[in-house]
Image (cartoon, grey):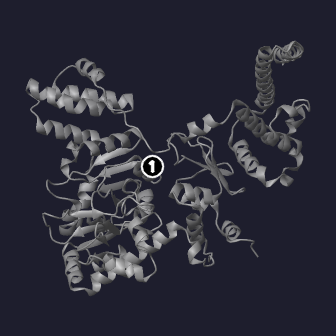
Amino acid sequence: MFSSPIEEIKSKLDIVEVISSYIKLIKAGVNYKALCPFHGEKTPSLFVSPSRQIWHCFGCSEGHSVFDFVMKIEGVEFGDALRILAHRAGVELKPIKPELRTKRQRFYEICELAAKFYKKQLEKSSKGKEAKEYLLQRGINEESIKKWRLGWAPDAWRGLAKFLGSQNYSLEEMQKVGLLIKGEKGSYDRFRSRIMFPVFDLNSQIIGFGGRVLKKEKKLAKYMNTPNTLLYDKGRILYGLDKSKIEIRKNDFCVLVEGYIDVILAHQEGKANVVATAGTALTPFQLAILKRYSSNLMLAFDMDFAGDAATKRGIDLARARGFNIKVVKMPEGKDPADIISKDAKEFGKLVNNSVSILDFHFQNAFSQFDKKTAEGKRKISNVLLPVIKGVLNKIEQASWVQELATQLNVREKDIEIELKKVKIEEVSDSGLEINNFQKQAAKKTKKQVLEERLLTLLLKSPQHLSSVDKEIIPYFSSQTQEIVNNFENLDKISTEFSNIINTLSLKAEVEQIEEEEILSELKFCLKEIKTVELKKKLDDVSLQIRQAEQEQDIKKIEDLNQEFNQLTKKIITN
């Protein structure tokens, strides 16, 4: 018998299998390694230990159990991670009292019930049937309507509110989940007379909605989305990714489109690696999510996207993060849904004939301006030089400088001179914790870093334990003292320190260091730890001397000066 659902889940799930469903793992001896999805890096620093069933990133210090990984990568609380992994492990969680359910869980329930309400309206109401007929005319078949759980929001001010109220959900909860608007004369349904597209998280749980008007009216926006809530943040969501992530990883590229219907029709026709930004330019959060599955993006946007500043910034950010970007050149005035509904094979051809983002910018610029005139050359260079400046690889950048010089029939040297004048806006991942490893490193003192290094070396070569002189042990922190004193019986050490030992043991396993170098580095750590502690004591004595001088306590000053001199000698002779 298991003592808890947590232990049962851990026993039934392999951490390697779970983590590999999110990111690509590479075998590294008895362990696995990967590029960490929680901070930007080019060399793998995240390691997974099958024997210990733990993971740890030695770049940003994130790590530990499979629950920690799911919480971090899904952006959920422990309770939600527990439900995700319980479902995966086939473990049934006991029902909890309604009053003990988390706010997040109740919001999920409200969204699920709202989707069922809208689905019923699509099937049963006269207006809903009209909306369904429109969807069928657009090429969306019955199977896709069910798969994507499309629905209809009736033209009623409180239709959904009454239904959810009958299920014991409050108006305040409906408002906080984004389905109700609080007005001066009371609350009313946010979505009315709209085709409803549920928006899913990576676990296919509904977290929000997009609503599209059936007939275009001047007073109504074509699309309306759930506002940002506890569950839904449009800057972190990619529509269809829950159904696309496996195919994206399998094909190693993702096609980005703009609308819900574009995604649904693409999937319907077998293009299952298509997702939509759904009304936002690419954000750092969306890019961080996509990076888990592929670094290759194809943009199938309306052709006027090149002039949109927000879209350009998103593309620049993607390039800065190492994405390989191509453009699917769409016919003017057409979107993927228009093309797929008429000829699905044509969209496939467009994807296959996609061009690099640099080729696209070149073609676009040279089609707009006359390269034979001085003014045209200046305008072309104004468009293309910032784009070339954004190329990270200097060899690739040089080839584009050569290409521009050739096409403009000017000297490369002149292009390079003008390129140096270009100042591009620095793209940053503001709000995204990609620099978390720097924050973590800043939190650790020099002594903590040295003690962790010391323990790692001892775990890698336990035979060097005898090199740790008993006289130096008092200079260690209480945590390191307990570990060193119980080094030969680590299995009996307190749970408080077992996580640290597991993490450092994993680090010891994956680190490559020559045996003869270990002893010298270990001695260096011991010497530095002692020096750090002595200097700390020296600072304390210096402070006490100043206080004694203010108090004019001659005897105390003499004693402290003697202690100061002794500490100084120890530091020099250490």
Q: Residue at (18%, 64%) from the top-left corner?
A: 220
Give whichever of 223, 389 is nearer the camera.
Answer: 223
Q: Quadrant of residue 337?
A: bottom left
* Vertical order, 486 against 424 (above or below): below
Residue 203 can be seen, yes or no: yes
- Packing grade of label 1 (10 A; few <14, some 14-19, many >=20) is many
Give whichever of 413, 368 is nearer the camera.
Answer: 368
Q: Quadrant of residue 539?
A: top right
In the shown orientation, is residue 95 left or right of residue 108? right
Q: Residue at (45%, 61%) from the top-left corner?
A: 230
What type is the residue that disc 1 sits on? Ala
Q: How far from the left and from the top, in percent, is residue 506?
A: 71, 47
- SS state under label 1: helix
* Vertical order, 93 against 226 (above or below): below
* Vertical order, 239 against 448 (above or below): below
Q: Residue at (79%, 27%) from the top-left corner?
A: 533
Q: Quadrant of the C terminus?
A: top right
Q: Quadrant of residue 335?
A: bottom left
Q: How far from the left and from the top, in percent, is residue 252?
A: 42, 54
Give whichever of 504, 273 is nearer the camera.
Answer: 504
Give whichever of 449, 569 is nearer the camera.
Answer: 569
Residue 49 can be seen, yes or no: no
Q: How far from the left and from the top, in percent, is residue 376?
A: 11, 29
The residue wearing badge 1 is 288
Q: Quadrant of the N terminus?
A: bottom right
